[in-house]
Image (spheres, grey):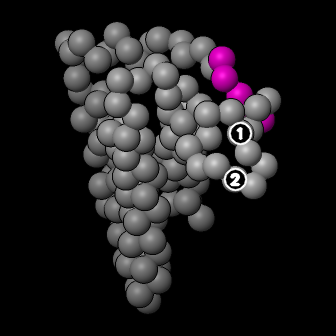
Amino acid sequence: MMMHVSVEKDVRMGIQMMKYIVNHYENFTLVIPPFMITLMWSINSYIIEINVLLILSSMTDIISVIMKYVSLAAISMIPTFYFNSITHHKLLKCAKMEIKITNFRADKPLQNAPICTLAC
């Protein structure tokens, strides 16, 4: 459960970014690369969680479960440690930007939909 709680925020962020990319495709020069990166981020988070569950469920000793959990949790935080260690990079200006959500798919669900359904 603890690993799920710590990984869930990465999955949620990836899904929110994918939704933003789909709803605001006109703000991107190419839509597929950012969508694929966020999709890989979400899938990678699920794979990490499944691996931790498999590894920890194979342990029989409580002390070894705790030690393995701590080490695996630290491994899953490596990208965060790397990002926080960057001090002077041009992408850090983007981290504090507010992204305004202007398009909501619920308002016009079939507008600019790539696949024509029976309602077209």
Q: In this orientation, which residue lies closer to the viewer: 29 or 69?
A: 29
Q: Quadrant of residue 73?
A: bottom left
- Residue at 29 percent across and 37 percent down: it is 81
| Residue 110 circle label | 1
Residue 33 shows in this picture: yes
Q: Quadrant of residue 34?
A: top left
Q: Are marks 2 and 1 in contact (CB under 8 Å)?
A: yes
**Of marks 2 and 1, the one in the foreground:** 2
The reply to whether the magenta stretch includes residue 105 is yes
Q: How far across and how far down the image is residue 68, in percent? A: 35, 69
Task: Report whether 72 appears left or right of 103.
Answer: left
Q: Quadrant of the N terminus?
A: bottom right
Q: Which residue is mark 2?
A: 117
Q: Residues within 10 Å of mark 2 (few under 14, many from 20)?
A: few
Residues rendered magenta in the picture: 102-106
Q: Callout 2: helix, strand or loop?
A: loop
Against 44, is 55 above or below? Answer: below
Q: How far across and how far down the image is residue 78, in percent? A: 28, 45
Q: Residues within 10 Å of mark 1 (few under 14, many from 20)?
A: some
Residue type, numbered disc 1: Leu
Q: In this orientation, which residue lies closer to the viewer: 23 or 3?
A: 23
- Residue at 60 percent across and 14 percent down: it is 100
- Residue at 45 percent across and 13 percent down: it is 96
| Residue 98 circle label | none
Q: In this orientation, which residue lies closer to the viewer: 56 or 113?
A: 113
The reply to whether the magenta stretch includes residue 119 is no
